[in-house]
Image (tube, helix red, strand yellow):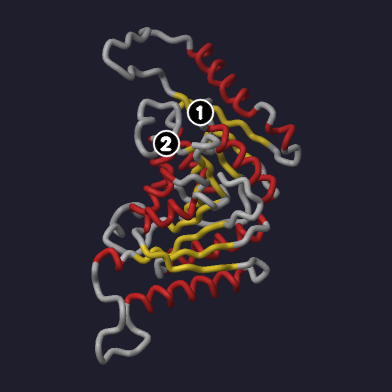
Amino acid sequence: MNLNTGAPVVVGVDGSAVALDAVRAAARTAAARHRPLRVVHAFIWPLMGVPLDPAPGAPADGGLRNQAEKALEEAVAEAGKVAPEVPVTGAVVDGAPVSVLLDEARDAALMVLGNRGLGGFAGLLIGSVTVQVSARAQCPVLVVRGESRADGPVVVGVDGSELSTEAIGFAFEEASRRGTALVAVHGWLYPTPVGPGDILPLVYDLDAYGAEEERVLAESLAGWAERYPDVTVHQRLVRGSAARILVEESRSAQLVVVGAHGRGALGGLLLGSVSHAVLHHAHCPLAIVRPRPATGA
């Protein structure tokens, strides 16, 4: 996350209707955060070696480069309609979408993306670019999907790991900014073997196990309420799949916040199993938060 107060909110566009939804959300977010907005179109065609200018005899405003410029102009104009007080700049940047957006994320306060766009990956539940950028960006990524609503709480997934601390802080800040409550969700299941030779007891003391998970949730939230006294916090400790619970909570939420990784056995994935599932199935916008890179890294 870029702590520079002048760092922009960046939104990626590709000329699709979904991208314009992302632009509107990005403009509102930039206004709420008192930050500038940067609109970026990744222009991949120079890498493909195809003609970029209008074909002979075609209208002068044709060609791939002009199409990209038009898509960018439309997006910048839309942002100005939504939040005229926000300074907006736009750029067509040569390169593949993932690499361009990851470069932009280095200097951004927040990256905003639609859940899918143009191209051959439209049949997936969510766009390939969105998945890859969400997993690797050096700033929080807001994925605009589902229903955007002005009421309802901010929901955050809590797993007790250090990596979820950034997500909790982001969620408190968003709840405070939006003037709404925060629902902190911690789902737990019976322990399962994570490697060969693991030996687990046949019988568990459910009361003791539940008490331990309750402690994990409480300790994860400790101190945040003092920093954000205006935010009402509801703790939800549920025995069950964290991903399923978060998706269900998203039906009535303004925003769901998750960390990019967790403490589960699938932590080696680009996205943790919970964040990956919520990214694909949430019913409202989703923020995916990674830990800040170490200074000098």
Q: In the rendered image, which quarter is residue 54 located in? A: bottom left
What is the secondary structure assignment of the residue under circle 2? helix
Q: Earlier in the sequence, mark 2 or mark 1?
A: 1
Image position of 88 (left or right of 192): right
Query: Residue at 26% across / 85% down in the picture?
Result: 55
> For the N terminus, which image quadrant?
top right
Q: List the residue tagged with mark 2.
A: 274
Query: Residue at 28% across / 10% down in the picture?
Result: 197
For mark 1, does the 10 Å Cα neighbourhood hold few (<14), some (14 to 19), or many (20 or more) residues?
Answer: many
Query: Residue at 64% across / 58% down in the picture?
Result: 35
- Reply above or below: 228 against 31: above
Name the kind of residue labelled 2 in the image: Val
Residue 28 shows in this picture: yes
Rendering coords of residue 271 (x, y %): 39, 39
Query: Residue at 36% across / 66% down in the picture?
Result: 43
Rendering coords of residue 41 (x, y %): 43, 65
**Circle on res. 225:** none
The alpha-carbon separation of the residues under discs 2 and 1 comes to: 10 Å
Rendering coords of residue 60 (x, y %): 35, 89
Name the kind of residue labelled 1 in the image: Asp
The one of 64 and 75 positioned closer to us in this rendering: 64
**Circle on res. 159:** 1
Image position of 159 (left or right of 151): left
Rendering coords of residue 183 (x, y %): 60, 38
The one of 142 and 155 positioned closer to us in this rendering: 142
Q: In the rendered image, which quarter is residue 7 located in? A: bottom right
For mark 2, does the 10 Å Cα neighbourhood hold few (<14), some (14 to 19), or many (20 or more) residues?
Answer: many
The one of 78 and 136 positioned closer to us in this rendering: 136
Q: In the rendered image, which quarter is residue 34 located in? A: bottom right
Q: Are marks 2 and 1 in contact (CB under 8 Å)?
A: yes
